[in-house]
Amino acid sequence: MNKKKLITHNGTFHADDIFACATLSILLDKKKQKFKVIRTRDPKIIENGNYVFDVGGIYDVDLNRFDHHQKGGAGKRENGIEYSSFGLVWQKFGEELCGSKKVMERIDKKLVAPVDANDNGIDLVENKNEISPYFIQDFFRAMRPTWRENNLDTDKIFIKAVSIAKEHLLRVIKRAQDFLLAEDIVISIYNNTEDKRIIILDVDYPSREIVGSFPEPLFVIHPRDTDNTWGVGTVRKDARNFENRKNLPQAWAGLKDEELQKVTGVEDAIFCHRALFLAVAKSKEGATKLAEIALLE
C-alpha cells in the first residue's frame, strides 16, 4: 500500500506544526491508513504531498494545503486570532476526530487557538512580577536541541514530540467529550435545586465552569472518589482566576480533624484548605452542614 505523505518544514519545530502533524496522524490512524512524515522545504517533494502543513505558501482546504506564512496569511477567527497550521488542519478535520462540532469548538478555544495565537505573535496573558506562564509551547520548545547539541537528529525529535502531542490531544478530546456529557446533567441538577446557593452533585462531575455560569451558586458539594469523602468547593467569580464568590470561613483555614470539628460543630469534618476554597467531611451530610454554616459566615 502507498503511504500517505505528511509534509512539513525541516529545521526548528514549533507547537503548531507538531499538533497539526498529531491531528493528521490520529485521523489517518483511525482510517487505518499508513503514512510517513517528511520534513523538507524542497518544492518538488512538497508538491507531491498528500497533506502539506506549515510550509509551501498555500492554503487550500480542498487540496489539503495548510500553510499560513504566505502574504495575507490564511484568515482569522471572529475573535481576531489568526490561524496557524494547527488551526487550519483543525478547522477541516477537528469535527471528524471529535465526533461533534461542539467538542471540536471547545477544543479550538481551549488548545488550538492559544497555540495559533502564540505562533502568530499574539499575547493572550499579561505577565506579572516578572514571571511568565509556562505554556505547552514551552514544553515542546524544551525538546529542541540547544546550540551545543549539533549531533542531535531534529527530525527524530520532531517525531517524538508528535507522539507526545497525539497522546495529549486524544486526552483533550476525551475530556471535552465527557465534559459536555456532564454539562446537561449538572444543569438539570441546578434547575431542580431549591436553594441554588448550594449545589449538591451525586458524582464528581467537571462542574466548576458549568456551575459558575449561573449567578446564584456559592458552594458545590461533591463526592471525592479518591478517598470516599465529600468536598465543599467554592465557586469562582471567573473561571480564569482564583477569586471566589464567597470564601469558606477564615476561622477554618488550615484546620484538620478535631480542630476543625470543634470550630464547626460538624463531627466528621476532616480538613479545610488554608486558601479557603475547599473543605472536606467524611459524609455527604457533613459536607452539607459545612456549606450551610459557611453561607451564614
Image (cartoon, rainbow, N blue to C red):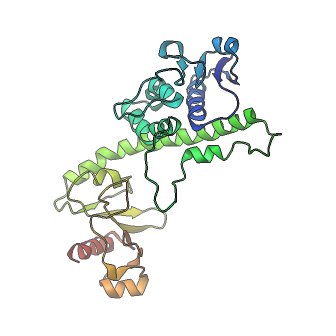
Assign the C terminus to one quadrant of the image: bottom left
**Residue 179 in picture, x, y percent from top left:** 39, 45
Residue at 50% x, 30% y: name it: 84
The answer to whether residue 114 of the structure is visible from this angle is yes
Q: Is residue 267 visible?
A: no
Q: Residue furthest right?
A: 151
Relative placement, left or right, of 88 versus 231 is right
| Residue 183 position within the rendered picture, expressed as x and y whole percent measured from the top left | 32, 46
Instruction: Identify the residue at horizontal 61%, vertical 37% (top origin).
Output: 14
Whether residue 122 is situated above or below residue 282 in the rendered picture: above
Is 235 placed above or below 16 here? Answer: below
Q: Residue 20 is drawn in which quadrant?
A: top right
Position in image of residue 295 (x %, y %): 22, 72
Residue ID at (49%, 13%): 62
Figure check: 104 above or below 223: above
Q: Quadrant of residue 181?
A: top left
For the N terminus, the quadrant is top right
Quadrant of the image occupied by residue 203: bottom left
Q: Give the residue displayed 69% in from the left and 34% down from the top.
A: 159
